[in-house]
Image (cartoon, rainbow, N blue to C red):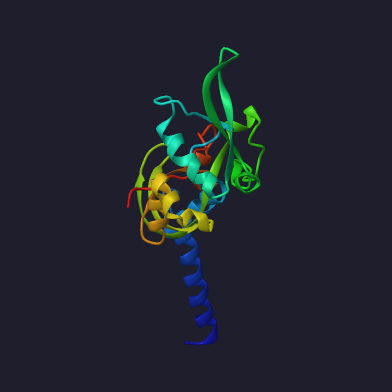
Amino acid sequence: MNDTNRWKGVLLAAALLVSAGACRSKTDASRADFTRGVRAYLEQRGDLCVGRPRWPVDVAERAGSESAQDAAQLPVLERLGLVASTVLAERRGGVATPFELRRYRLTAAGRKHYIDRETRLPTPPDEPGDAARADFCVVRLELGRVESWDVQQGAPPTALVSYTYRADAPSWTRDAGFQKVFPAVARLLAGAGTAHLVEGFTLTPDGWTANDLLPKASGRPAQAAAP
């Protein structure tokens, strides 16, 4: 084959590759497509929060009046230096009663983990308006590997994507007492690298986008799948 024919062959092969790429359907999906989508999702929603948007938290100490969850979790957070408590007289209708309550507030250490889920920055915990987007968040998730996906044709196409994850968490989340009263966090940490999380995606003009990042999405924090 002379040089002219050799270059014609190279150009023909390149043209076929371009043509194949151009014919790829927008609904086609690869691991690379969903890897980009999951990473974008976790960059914005990768904080695992424990559902404590409102502070301070009052726990009445009279028998039968306290929240069982508050009574179990808050003393553990206080032992770990994340909250501090004071004892106050319980009031009803603005009038003091003979009963007492314990009021828990975030310490400086705890405030570092009370963040605005949109900006991922710490926010004041005592501002009532901040609770709409804020929470006490204790684990930061990063993508391990996209494992599988199930694309459903529609208008627009959607997909369920399963992936493994890495977990970046402060050392106190490994405390046995903490893990006992926050079992979902304990399961998430135990499953890092092996357990799967599942997220819904929708095909948009910008590519496959997590449903939580679509307009009017709820913006919930990441949730752990049961290992």
Residue 44 at what x, y percent from top left? 56, 47
Occupied quadrant, residue 89: top right
Task: Mark yes or no: residue 211 visible.
Answer: no
Q: Is residue 23 above or below residue 123?
A: below
Residue 210 screen position, x and y as percent: 48, 44
Most extreme residue toward the bottom, as rendered? 2
Vertical placement of 145 versus 139: above or below? below
Left or right, residue 227 beside residue 167: left
**Residue 119 in view of the camera:** yes
Q: Position of residue 113 (x, y in %)?
A: 59, 46
Count up the numbered dots: 0
Q: Say whether residue 119 is left or right of residue 217.
A: right
Q: Is residue 115 above or below residue 94?
A: below
At x 45% / y 25%, what residue is drawn?
62
Q: For residue 153, which quarter of the picture?
A: top left
Residue farthest to the left, as pictured: 227
Q: Pick whichever, 183 or 133, lies toward us.
A: 183
In the depicted view, which residue is nearer to us: 152 or 1? 152
| Residue 206 in the figure: left or right of residue 150 | right
Residue drawn at point x = 39 percent, y = 25 percent? 64
Residue 71 location (% of width, % of height): 45, 36
